[in-house]
Image (cartoon, grey):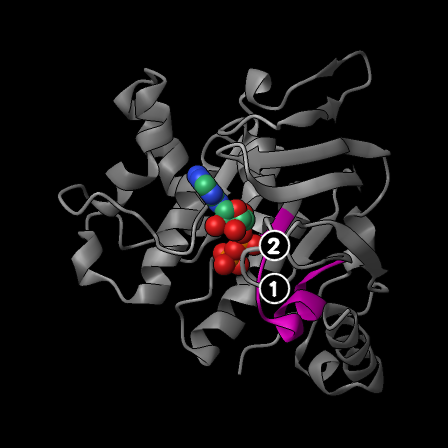
Amino acid sequence: MKTATLETSKVKNESGSLLRINNVSKIYDGSITALSDVNLDIPEGEFMSFVGPSGCGKSTIFKIIAGLSDPTSGSIEMVSPTKTETMMDRNEVGFVFQHATLLPWKSVLDNVGLPLELKGVSKKERQEKGMEVLEMVGLKGYEKALPRQLSGGMQMRVSIARSLIAKPKLLLMDEPFGALDEMTRQNLHYELLKIWEKTGMTVLFITHNVFESVFLSTKIAVMSARPGRITNVFEVPPYDRDDSFRSTPEFSQLVGEISKGLQH
Ligand SMILES: Nc1ncnc2c1ncn2[C@@H]1O[C@H](COP(=O)(O)OP(=O)(O)OP(=O)(O)O)[C@@H](O)[C@H]1O
């Protein structure tokens, strides 16, 4: 198995908050309370996972952060040195979903360039930037392939590359590896951590897999069953993320504590 030693402490927590979630509640259809008074401060450069029972509102938080849904009450603020504004105003949020959602008739390179195509960026620039991000996800040489010619893991790499092309400051990943086999998933963990380290972006990551959350994250937000609230935020010390990390007592202890936290 591949090993990547990452000094994850290098990129975290250097410049204060990037995002503030202030008393956010969400009620769907006037009666389904998905979120209740969620408060969270997310420092810049953090890799934060969200774990919680099915239906506790994890995806709802992401949709609100991305500006795809409005909170019923409360607010989301992006904190910049000069002013407070919403993320979507600055076009700095990338989104990766559980399924790669690629356009089957477009080549890998054209799929990756889509966010820039929608913004009217020239083909030449799209292709140059597309090649850069394909290299980052280890897919150089596959730019002319069609999605159906790729494995599930490779399709997910394309989806990640597409989310990176506009150089987001914040990347929202909603169970991106949930449909992949364990080996592919572990390889992508290393790739993702390398990208996170290289770009210094803030990553928010939804998963049902506590092991995955401890391996990847610097912080883990545990949520209660609906109506969703943040019940605890665990800090993962900056261990080197290599294969041996998964078999350390510290890793097992954190997995145990978070799993216990999920039962309350
Ligand atoms: N558009 C909607 N209209 C009505 N109810 C909704 C809508 N979207 C989500 N819900 C409800 O809000 C609650 C939270 O949903 P959400 O998808 O955010 O949870 P989740 O934690 O991401 O779930 P899972 O882990 O199963 O993906 C659920 O009870 C869901 O049924």
Q: Secondary structure at mark 2?
A: loop
Ligand 1 within 8 Å, label 2 CB:
yes
* Category of crowding for the residue at label 2, using alpha-carbon neighbours closer than 10 angstroms: few (below 14), some (14–19), many (at least 20): many
User: Which residue in the rendered view is the most extreme toward the top?
Assistant: 82
What type is the residue that disc 2 sits on? Cys
**In this rendering, would 168 be left or right of 17?**
left
Q: Secondary structure at mark 1?
A: loop
In-front residue for pair 20/148: 20
* Category of crowding for the residue at label 1, using alpha-carbon neighbours closer than 10 angstroms: few (below 14), some (14–19), many (at least 20): some
Q: Residue at x 71, y 25 (%)?
A: 75
Seen in the picture, residue 227 relative to 138 is either above or below; the reply is: above
**Residue 83 location (% of width, % of height):** 78, 12
**Residue 32 location (% of width, % of height):** 55, 42
**Residue 60 location (% of width, % of height):** 55, 42
Q: Which mark is residue 246?
A: none
What type is the residue that disc 1 sits on? Pro
Residue segment shown in magenta: 204-218
Residue 257 sits in which quadrant? Answer: bottom right
Q: Which residue is mark 1?
A: 53
Is 205 in the magenta? yes
Q: Which mark is residue 56?
A: 2
**In this rendering, would 184 be left or right of 213?**
left
**In this rendering, would 97 be left or right of 210?**
left
**Residue 109 location (% of width, % of height):** 28, 41
